[in-house]
Image (spheres, rainbow, N blue to C red):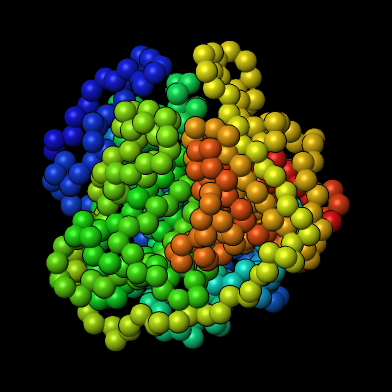
């Protein structure tokens, strides 16, 4: 193994602690022994009295990401991350979530349209040694959503250590399309998470002001909890459902031979028709579904290309100097044993409803800002450095009130030198415009998280359907978890 351990004085701030470093994230040249690709367990719960019931336990664990080194982790039913939950649109689900962590946490249902009380945000704390039991009807269309900790000020650290998992929703429409859908066989979930480690194997979370500012970027990428895995394709046409579960890093995904793939889905489910691409950016919290033809029996690597923070202006330059914007390998794919599956990519999937912007009841501004300059984030309150409409997150303040059964246009204005992946709870929206342009076909799907460029403006059309609650709010926030924890979050009611 060529992996090098050395001491790095952290970018901008000095750390004084040793951690496992690599000057080039990793490339397969650095890993001689082959590591198997891991597929998260699938957990479909059981039907009890007409409800689909899941039992989850938040617990401490340990992983061996590096041979011979133990990493203390947290997970859901497993040592690190959680099982992939699966249910069908229209089903009523009930989830018993027992917290055995030794400290408080929450579990938020990211991407779901659901009652505010069941949302699992900062207001639905699960105290240590207690059980929280959210239940709700699955309203979302077929899609891959996810769940993760959302504890006030501690989301970043809890997700970093492992509190996240996938949730696959099926519906009749998508099942009738003959898409690859055999979990772990030709329908492959992928969670990408970059991480830093101390030399004793433990995770190294934020340890400098610059990491607080840009969000933490790791030297290693865990793919479903494995560094540099090799995936042995079983089927010629394979569907990958990819979640960027990283705290802050945006990837620019593509294959090493630049082969085309078909983008078939985004955060909230299938697109209307496939879009052929050879690269696609994926910001924190976003999901894509792609179909790849692995029929040529050649080895290929799924990589992240340089350029993910290309249009990030000054901060992008700084981030690339800090080794945040690099080309690196994610998964080696071997397809010499891939079998023909007789499936091909359908040319049309489904029709999306047409949303006319004129139907919106109004335009709501969301102004994103962060504290900059000398003394940036030093001293002072670490939870008060990032702002939406001039204020950082306050559990006691409602920032917006929307009416159930209406559409709003949200104009998200970024007055900072960094891109922010903006996320809204309880909705799947559509992008109307990014800066001055119309969304590309690849951006026209249902979304719950959208990138807003540095000094850019993104317009989205946001539906509020199904649920209202006069007291319990939902969140909107930047999904760079260090920004969310640092204050870039607000609360809205749907009444
Ligand atoms: Cu993925 Cu408010 O969260
Ligand atoms: Cu969410
Ligand atoms: Cu941000």
Q: Residue 452, percent across and down? A: 53, 45
The number of discs equals: 0
Task: Give above or below for 488 relative to 475.
Answer: above
Viewed as shown, does residue 152 lie left or right of 77? right
* Image vertical order of residue 167 relative to residue 336, above or below: above
State left or right for residue 115 relative to residue 78.
right
Residue drawn 25% across and 45% down? 328
Question: For the C terminus, which image quadrant?
Answer: bottom right
Indicate the quadrant where residue 187 lies.
bottom left
Residue 223 coordinates in the image, percent (x, y): 34, 51
Residue 40 occupies quadrant: bottom left
Question: Which is more toward the observer, 446 or 199?
Answer: 446
Residue 198 occupies which quadrant of the picture? Answer: top left
In the depicted view, which residue is nearer to us: 450 or 103?
450
Q: Is residue 38 left or right of residue 401?
A: left
- The structure residue drawn at horizontal position 36% and vertical position 31%, both measured from the top left corner, is 317
Q: Percent position (x, y) of residue 338? A: 21, 74
């Amino acid at each position: 193994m060529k992996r090098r351990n050395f001491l790095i004085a952290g970018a901008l701030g000095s750390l004084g602690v040793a951690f496992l470093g690599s000057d080039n994230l990793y490339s397969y040249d650095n890993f001689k022994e082959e590591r198997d690709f891991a597929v998260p367990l699938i957990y479909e719960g059981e039907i009890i009295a007409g409800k689909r019931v899941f039992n989850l336990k938040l617990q401490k664990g340990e992983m061996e990401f590096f041979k011979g080194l133990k990493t203390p982790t947290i997970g859901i039913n497993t040592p690190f991350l959680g099982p992939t939950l699966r249910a069908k649109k229209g089903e009523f689900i009930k989830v018993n979530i027992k917290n055995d962590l030794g400290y408080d946490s929450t579990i938020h249902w990211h991407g779901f349209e659901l009652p505010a009380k069941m949302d699992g945000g900062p207001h639905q704390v699960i105290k240590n040694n207690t059980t929280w039991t959210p239940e709700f009807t699955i309203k979302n269309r077929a899609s891959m959503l996810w769940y993760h900790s959302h504890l006030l000020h501690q989301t970043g650290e809890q997700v970093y250590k492992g509190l996240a998992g996938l949730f696959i929703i099926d519906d009749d429409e998508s099942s009738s399309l003959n898409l690859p859908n055999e979990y772990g066989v030709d329908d492959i979930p992928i969670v990408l998470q970059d991480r830093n480690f101390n030399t004793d194997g433990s995770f190294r979370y934020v340890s400098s002001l610059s990491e607080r500012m840009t969000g933490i970027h790791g030297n290693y990428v865990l793919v479903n909890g494995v560094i540099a895995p090799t995936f042995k394709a079983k089927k010629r046409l394979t569907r990958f459902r990819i979640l960027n579960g990283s705290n802050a890093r945006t990837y620019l995904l593509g294959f090493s031979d630049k082969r085309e793939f078909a983008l078939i889905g985004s955060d909230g489910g299938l697109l209307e028709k496939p879009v052929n691409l050879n690269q696609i950016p994926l910001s924190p919290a976003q999901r894509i579904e792609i179909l790849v033809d692995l029929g040529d029996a050649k080895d290929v690597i799924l990589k992240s290309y340089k350029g993910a923070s290309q249009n990030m202006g000054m901060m992008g330059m700084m981030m690339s100097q800090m080794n945040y914007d690099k080309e690196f390998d994610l998964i080696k794919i071997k397809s010499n044993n891939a079998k023909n599956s007789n499936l091909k990519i359908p040319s049309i999937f489904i029709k999306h409803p047409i949303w006319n912007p004129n139907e919106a009841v109004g335009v709501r501004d969301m102004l994103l800002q962060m504290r900059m300059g000398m003394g940036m984030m030093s001293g002072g309150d670490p939870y008060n450095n990032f702002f939406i409409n001039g204020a950082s997150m306050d559990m006691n303040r409602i920032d917006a009130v929307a009416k159930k059964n209406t559409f709003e246009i949200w104009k998200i204005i970024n007055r900072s030198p960094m891109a922010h992946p903006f996320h809204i709870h309880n909705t799947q929206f559509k992008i109307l415009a990014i800066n001055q342009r119309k969304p590309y076909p690849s951006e026209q799907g249902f979304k719950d998280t959208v990138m807003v460029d540095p000094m850019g403006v993104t317009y989205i059309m946001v539906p509020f359907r199904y649920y209202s609650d006069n007291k319990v709010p939902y969140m909107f926030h930047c999904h760079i978890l260090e920004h969310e924890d640092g204050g870039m979050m607000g609360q809205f009611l749907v009444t």
